Amino acid sequence: MSNTIPLSLDPPGTFLYTGEMATKGYNLTRFGLSLRRPDNRKAFLADEEGYMRGAGLSDTEIALVLARDWTGLIEAGGHLQSMLKVAATVGENLWHIGAHNAGMTADELMAICPRKVSALPGEES
Amino acid sequence: MARIVAGFGISHTPSMGIEYDRGIANGFAPHWQPWYDGTRPVKAWLSKLKPDRIVIVYNDHLNHFDFDAYPTIAIGVAPEFRQADEGWGPRPYPSLTGDVALGWHVTEHLVREAGFDPTVCQDLAVDHGIYSWLPYLMDPPWDVPTTPIAINMVRHPIPTSQRLLYLGQELRKALESFPSDDRILVVATGGMSHQISGARFGIANEALDEWFLDKIGPEVNTLVEVPQRELMRLGGTEAAELAIWFAMRGALSDEIREVYRYYTFPAITGCGVIAFEEGPAA
């Protein structure tokens, strides 16, 4: 487990949500946002796979959700804020997503946050 | 005509709201107590200021809008604004009171005079962008007429810093041509340093946030020249939301006085507030 924070915007440190990502992950993001409605959350929990097939997700996307592979989902274009709705629905939260992204457990991540850096624009770090 | 009497910038985060509810019920967690304490003076200031109307520039987090149609700039023009369900169910708070008259007036100005093309929302659910910090600063019912303006911060391209400063400047013109004697408060909320996805999750650049607070009053024109990518590189991708604060600053004059500031870093988001009043001290 590493607590090094690179001051760059490159993956896997950072996944910038660009138009390209929004196009790639359109269905996935739309599926996650459907869980803003309590009735949809209930339907999803009753039959995750069936609900996702109905939402038009691909086999790969469905497998990522079933595996709670938050990093894979973000790489597939699922917007963080949308995947957060999925996490909320299955009893997880932002820490679980962040921990998966950072390659550690949620408890480990909580223990090292805030992960302090110090640098200002124009100052070489 | 109406006049702008004050403005403030403030951070928002979902946990800020959840920790408020828990804190009021059972006492604040040690890492959130400083933010509660640090916002007490803002609450006292607002209760004396008693603005007649409030304009809040914030960002939605895919809680009302979705990518079928995601507006770059949207204005809420409705009698009230309900709280969005972010996936865990809404928290026990009432809706915000809307401000239809001012909303249309601002829309007229922005579209006809200022070169902006906002999406007008006659039904808008507001998320933690407003609901996370509002309970710290004002007790419900929230009956001061409020106009929310939502800025896209969830998918690039996001509006430039210069554009948001200009939005604030045009907002000022709109508010100052509103036919009333009302005293208006302008609020901006976003950031500060944080990143909530990727291996850099949890980045905390307190120096950057403090530097931003130092500069937004007296040196905003140099601050808007800092590339947003630089703010994101040093403060995390969501630090781009600091650009929203420029809309508040743009709505204020250069004759402002900083009346309060506070900053702390509870968990994964820099939590800051800075308040300004117009004109000489009373």
Image (spheres, coloured by chain):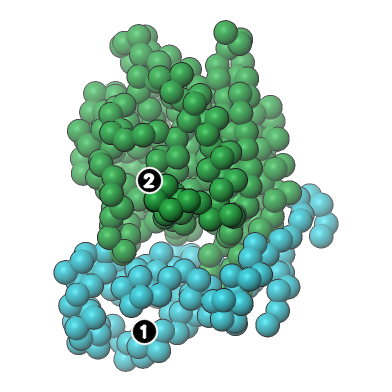
Chain colours: A cyan, B green
| Residue B115 vertical placement versus A120 (above, below) | above
Is residue B143 rendered to the left or right of residue B241?
left
x, y percent for residue A84: 40, 69
x, y percent for residue B190: 51, 46
> Residue type at mark 2?
Tyr
**Residue bearing mark 2:** B131
Label 1 environment density (alpha carbons within 10 Å; few <14, some 14–19, many ≥20): many
Quarter of the picture containing the N terminus of chain B is: top left
Q: Is residue A30 visible?
A: no
Label 2 – label 1 distance at C-alpha: 29 Å
> Residue type at mark 1?
Val
Residue drawn at x 35%, y 88% is: A66
Is residue B272 rendered to the left or right of residue B47?
right
The answer to which of B112 and A105 lies nearer the viewer is: A105
Label 2 environment density (alpha carbons within 10 Å; few <14, some 14–19, many ≥20): many
* Chain name for mark 2: B
Residue drawn at x 49%, y 26% is: B44
Q: Which mark is residue A65?
A: 1
Is residue B207 rendered to the left or right of residue B276?
right
| Residue B61 vertical placement versus B82 (above, below) | below
* Chain name for mark 1: A
